[in-house]
Amino acid sequence: MAEGIEAIYNFLKLSDYVATAGQPTEEQFAAIKEAGYQVIVNLAPPNSTNAIPHEREIVESLGLKYTHIPVAWTKPTFGHLDQFFPVVMENTEIPIFIHCAKNMRVSVFMYLYHRLYDRWDDQQAKSDLHKIWIPNETWQEFIQRAIYDYGPIFQFDDPNAIGSRDFWF
């Protein structure tokens, strides 16, 4: 019997329409389809741990839509967010499976999506993020810059709300 998607490293179901995880194996993409997901988004660069060189072909051969936004571990950018946010927004009622190597990049991107687009309060968004990890300094700074720069666009009430390091602990 094939293993379910819950066996994928750092799998986290965020809603009926969104699940996130680390890198699935080739075989696990069939389980993702079987679970009803129709869109796969990959935030891992091609040289990431356990990356599958022909992932796009595998996913598309299963009849699923595939988007690859390679985010360098040490250099996440607003350009990556500008590509990511519309993909999630376009699929709010279509089951979407978002992964990277370990679900760390994805958890930060989803944290920002929930804070900025869904207007979740910090505690709610941080709860899902911390199920995966507590971001390191690079990613904390990225989050802070994103909230500060994107916050006014989305009329975020207090862009300084996450300014202190003890926010994460």
Image (cartoon, grey):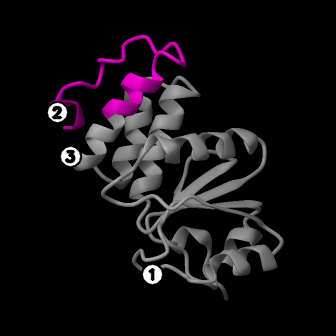
Along the viewing direction, whichever of 154 and 16 lies nearer the viewer: 154
Alpha-carbon neighbours of circle 3 within 10 Å: few (<14), some, or many (≥20)? few
> Could you tell which of marks 3 and 2 lies nearer the N-terminus?
3
Q: Is residue 111 magenta?
A: no
Range covered by the magenta-colored residues: 144-169
On screen, residue 33 above or below 58: above
Q: Are marks 3 and 2 in contact (CB under 8 Å)?
A: no
Dividing the picture into quadrants, the one containing residue 72 is: bottom left
Q: Mark 3 points at which residue?
A: 137
Along the viewing direction, whichever of 37 and 152 lies nearer the viewer: 152
For image coordinates 49% across by 79% down, the residue present is 51
Q: Which mark is residue 165?
A: 2
On the question of residue 44 being in view, the answer is yes
Residue 161 is situated, as x and y percent measured from the top left of the image, at 30, 19
Residue type, mark 3 in image: Glu
Position of the C terminus, as image quadrant, is: top left
**Is 117 on the left-hand or right-hand side of 135?**
right
Residue 10 is situated, as x and y percent measured from the top left of the image, at 44, 64
Q: Residue furthest front?
A: 79
Count of numbered labels shown in the rendering: 3
Q: Name the residue under label 1.
A: 50
Residue 5 is situated, as x and y percent measured from the top left of the image, at 60, 70
For image coordinates 31% across by 31% down, the residue present is 144
For image coordinates 23% across by 37% down, the residue present is 168
Residue type, mark 2 in image: Arg
The span from disc 2 to disc 1 (Cα, nearest Å) is: 32 Å
The span from disc 3 to disc 1 (Cα, nearest Å) is: 24 Å
Residue type, mark 1 in image: Asn
